[in-house]
Image (tube, rainbow, N blue to C red):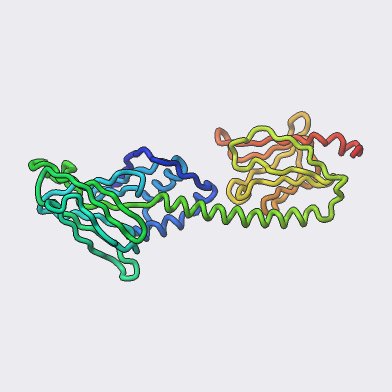
Amino acid sequence: MTRLLPFRSKRFASTCLALLGTLSVLGADAARAGSRPDAAVRDATQQYATTGKAPVIERSDSVVYPFGESQPVLQCTPLRACDVELEAGEVVHGVALGDTERWISSPLYSGDPDALVPHVVVKPRDYGITTNMIVTTTRRTYHLNLVAPAKGKTDETDGAYLRRVRFYYPGDVVEQWSDAAQLEATRANRQSEATIASLTGAMNPGRMNFDYALSGGHFTGFRPTTIFDDGHHTYIQLPAGAAAVDAPAFLARTQSGEEAILNYRMNASWIIVDGLFERGELVAGVGRSRKAVKITNRGFARVTTGSR
């Protein structure tokens, strides 16, 4: 059975939450770690991406540490071989022990020849001793504390003997998410620029109204970045990526607050409303999860009276 142990993260890794639903990168990360895609690793990486806290994952046969976010500790006893499993595809450059007289280390490899999983096997020669170990690879440097409990405290059921330590790499995954988010934002911006060019090319600049105000929704992912109308249609631009992940519904409101029916459609990151409105809302979710951004057309009276 797997359970998560909380650990205070040393840093907060920001990422694009819009990409959290795309978890194939986690499967690739788990595959590099030498196992099938792992639900516990996936959940722990999501937790790191959203909170900056990377938990230690404890299992019946091993402990999985978030690389760079906690201090790995390997507890081993004489006459036992303990395993430090690294990331598949890494090549071990060297292993340095703080105490080479009473500790022994040996590098080993397992798995597919095209994606070998490196291991460092560690054995203490005595009880009641501690030291540290540094492992350098082609990708990173690992720092571990090694502990051999005092004699008489070696019952495997009391946690004194930990035969296997593994790692997952939340920082690497979040960085991949961030890179993917930047690529998506660039693509969306280019598409948006092309869209607005096609939308405004035939417009009469003298009839364009940008006099709109927003209220609420500061912490939503869909607060508009641009709103204008051409006297016939209203154009609402959402932040990059919002249309694909957190697309809101548009509601027009009368002065009394009742819902007015106006057709609208999505074009890239734009909501294009067929008509003008004095008040409107972008809404997503229901109940306590409901989020809304209110839109006021301050130029509505000028448009409808034909004074513009």
Q: Determine the image quadrant of residue 285.
A: top right
Q: Please give the count of numbered marks on the rendered protein.
A: 0
Closer to the camera in the image, 80 or 289: 80
Quarter location, residue 113: bottom left
Q: Is residue 66 above or below residue 214?
A: below
Which quadrant of the view contains residue 11? Answer: top left
Q: Residue furthest left?
A: 152
The outermost residue toward the bottom is: 113
Q: Residue at x 83, y 46 (%)?
A: 230
Q: Position of residue 261 (x, y in %)?
A: 76, 41
The reply, left or right, for residue 25 in relation to residue 192 is: left
Of residue 290 and residue 69, the one placed in the foreground of this image is 69
Which one is nearer the viewer's eye here, 67 or 210? 67
Residue at 77% over, 57% down: 198
**Left-right relation of 14 to 266:** left
Quarter containing the C terminus: top right
Image location of residue 100, percent across then percent down: 15, 53
Question: Along the horizontal axis of the image, is 80 left or right of 220?
Answer: left
Residue 268: horizontal and vertical position, in percent?
67, 54
Q: Position of residue 92 (x, y in %)?
A: 29, 61
Drawn side of residue 77 relative to residue 223, left or right:
left
